[in-house]
Image (spheres, rainbow, N blue to C red):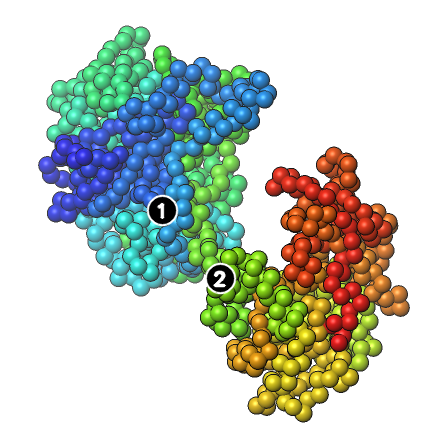
Amino acid sequence: MVSHAQTHRLESGGLIDRSAPLNFRFDGKTFAGFQGDTLASALIANGVKLVGRSFKYHRPRGILTSGSEEPNALVELRTGARREPNTKATTTELYDGLEAASQNRWPSLRHDLMAVNQLFSPIFVAGFYYKTFMWPAKFWEAIYEPAIRRAAGLGRAAGVADPDHYDKAWAHCDVLIAGSGPAGLAAALAAGRCGARVILCEEDFALGGRLLADGGTIDGMPAAEWISRTLAELAMLPDVRIMNRTTLFGVYDGGTYGAIERVNDHLPSPPEHQVRQRLWRIVAKRCVVAAGAIERPIVFAGNDTPGVMMASAMRTYVARYAATPAKRIALFTNNEDGWRTVETALGAGLQIVAVVDARPDVSAAHRALAAKAGFPVLNGSVAGVEGGKDGVRKILISLTGGARAEVEADGLAVSGGWNPAVGLTSYHRAQPKWQDDISAFVPDSAPPGMVAAGAANGAFGLGACMSQGFAAGAAAAQSAGHNGNAGTPPVADDEAFSLTPLWHVAGKGKAFVDYQHDVTASDIELAQREGFESVEHLKRYTTLGMATDQGKTSNVAGLAILAAVSGKSIPETGTTIYRPPYVPVAIGAFAGHHRDENFHATRLTPSHHWAAEQGAVFVDTGLWKRAQWYPRAGEKDWLESVTREVKAVRSGVGFCDVSTLGKIDVHGPDAGAFLDRVYINTFSNLAVGKARYGLMLREDGMVYDDGTTSRLAEDHYFLTTTTAKAGPVMQHLEFCRQVLFPQLDVQLTSVSDQWAQFSIAGPKTRDLLREMIDPAEDLSNEAFPFMGAREVSLRGGIRARLFRISFSGEMAFEISVPARYGDALVRNLMLAGKQFGVTPYGTEALGVMRIEKGHVAGPELNGTTTAADLGLGKMMSTKKDFIGRVMAGREALAAADRQVVVGIKPTDKKRRLRSGAHVIPKGELPGSANDQGYVTSVCFSPTLDQWIGLALVERGRERIGEIVHADDPLRGEDYDVELCNPVFYDPDGGRQRG
């Protein structure tokens, strides 16, 4: 559907580019705008007043502000995978084809059935969720909670993966400036002239801040010309960087600041190979906060009616965007600045129907302006607004002295004064102070190295902004070590400013303090009556200031109302703690490229590319991509592939890439003594050319890691760890070497990436190896027995290491070559093994064979088991000391009723086992009182033709043959299993020694 023309667009003026028309859609209707518009200004230009619904009551809401403080105009931007909820229309730069939709309404914005909530407003008061939905109790899970969850939230997330990319970057500077208004530009000019490295961040796409709407005269020239000249000079300074579309959102330790740059948010989608947003960590020696101030509303009945708008926002839309929020405007103000909106509106040819000024005295100049334009100046306050989803119709006025008046208007501009943007200066638990002459909080203490200037420091006059900003920039540059000539500061006059504080006008109807969370003045009064007088308690009880705008337009008014009903002053009432981020930041920006496959670095095994050619299915094992299984044509699922691989190894020969194991060279005269202290068993007496299985404990006596260690020379050991503990074990050993045993002459070198290692297993292993290894090498059982280890020569002369080690229970060797030969080795294994039916196998088949053989692995080495729990207690030497020995002897770790490793198998051979199932005595009810352990590892055993597993069970070894119950509440399964010997296959070890 195509909308009407831009009925509320001025024929001339503004900073929009009328030569660049744009089309966009809102709630399915097509509208027109111009380059330079925001979504909010374009909607206003098209006469759209209703843009959203409130969170709790679903009241109709219009645009309130023109900046990032906007609480009402939140939309879903874009569609499909790029749909982004809760996007502020006031900061969304218009682009051709923009697609936006209102949110938090059903079935439509104009006809929202959830508006029925307004009928229940007497129930939905402050803290209603603590007082309701308590009876009957069984209704909570069945009815109340699901209904509340469906009603909660505002917009809808895309529900699918974000197709865009995000980036993270670092920047360093001497002076960081937040804001490009008059104070910010003046600060950048001074610091840049002094020779400092300057970064200026501006959240808007255009530079100039309030100068873009309010104008003024600086150095005798119009503000627009001064901005242009200043930007040209800054562009010529070599160390000044201006970052528009970038918001400083956080202050952190060590002079580090967080900023979010919306790199391509102003486009439908980012160009190819470009990011959507970039998160900056900026390290600055000094920071000048020139973030301006936020105009605050006045709380009165009906103040949320579409068409009620902040006075500064109204003149921004008129002056900057040539868009008219209303044709017949009334102003409600308590300060001098509000009258600037009158001047702007009259200059654009709009009608002012009345000005309601709460101050007892209005300047003669303004009264003369009113007389000339023919509108009344009423001393009093707005008591209410009549209107609805189509906007304001009538304004109800309470005059000083008690009389009443009414004016008809289609728009109401409100100015309750200005609050300096103290967010950034109040991080690090800094507290702002109250300044009576502007009735606002201003920065007091601030994070180290930070200073505020201009309106952010409570100086609202243009001249004061210029002078403060320039002085702050020059001082920041000098304190950072740059003493260049800052030159002459810009000069401008200060506008008159006077204010009579007015926070809340009593009246009939709901008067909103927090627009987004529907917090009313009466909610704050109720919370105070119920004892929530602390501002922190008030915030959480009423949710005041907890919405996406973080209370930028509501917090001070809320504090003032709380102070009034508490009988305190506003500074006595205090403020809540300020915490970043200052504006919402997408989680994707915090993650950057660290998502999906880029969540962490990916490590590829030496055989990865070959395995990919074979169609292997890969699994993430820490940082590694490991082949999980190798499917063949006709195999219907993973289990069929894994079963084939296991059978091939058991009957013939297969190989698996085990290069991911940690590998550490241990050198030195004291290498054996060192290993004796870190392992529970002895290695100093290991013969050269032999390997031994070892177990490490933590200091607390729990098992840390296991692996094999081979002695290649008198002073040279080659140690392997599990894949998961490759890094941590290296760190642990270095700590032991450097801190615990510095007197030992030993050196450690991580060689995990230097060697490609393959396990070759099965009855035909020697046949395959003889095709690969120099015939002069004797591989017989006598010359190369089980647990033997030595260097050998491959055909072609390459030196390799060969270890007679078996994790599968079959006769097996592990062959290790320099990593650069890994790919060639795996291809030659396939060629040489073709005549023996060689089969590559993955980690699943490896896991099946280790369970059949009863070998423990990660699920059993879980940080809570001792050597005795794993059935390895006899390995613990009684003739030497080692890490963890004393603590392993604690009473609880030696208790007879500890959970120990046993085998399990279902009494029904067709039954599938599940890891994680709890072990319960047969005939007992599941529950913590009867829980005796759990299943750690399971697999389907092709050898036994049934599911088997390992479990940790109380007194398990004493109960071999007992039938117990396995309960799996997560999957809703339960069945009987038999406790058995954990070694299911070849218990005497004949096959691996053959």
- Residue 355 lies left or right of residue 547; in this view the side is left
Residue at (17% x, 23% y) in the render:
328
- Residue 370 lies left or right of residue 931; in this view the side is left
Give the quadrant of the C terminus.
bottom right
- Could you say which is closer to the camera, residue 658 or residue 145? 658
The answer to whether marks 1 and 2 mark residues whose Cβ atoms lie closer than 8 Å is no
Residue type indicated by callout 2: Gly
Residue at (51% x, 54% y) in the render:
254
- Residue 44 lies left or right of residue 735; in this view the side is left
How crowded is the residue under tag 1: few (<14 C-alpha within 10 Å), some, or many (20+)? some
- Could you say which is closer to the camera, residue 888 or residue 986? 986
Q: Is residue 825 above or below residue 602?
A: below
Q: Position of residue 383 (x, y in %)?
A: 32, 15
Marks 1 and 2, the one that precedes in the sequence: 1
Q: Is residue 907 above or below residue 433?
A: below
Residue 454 in view in this figure: no
Give the quadrant of the N terminus.
top left
Residue receiving disc 2: 634
Q: Nearer the viewer, mark 1 or mark 2?
A: 2
Q: Position of residue 158 (x, y in %)?
A: 38, 43
Residue at (20% x, 19% y) in the render:
409
How crowded is the residue under tag 2: few (<14 C-alpha within 10 Å), some, or many (20+)? few
Residue receiving disc 1: 81
Q: Secondary structure at mark 1?
A: helix
Quarter of the image where one finds residue 946: bottom right
Residue type indicated by callout 1: Ala
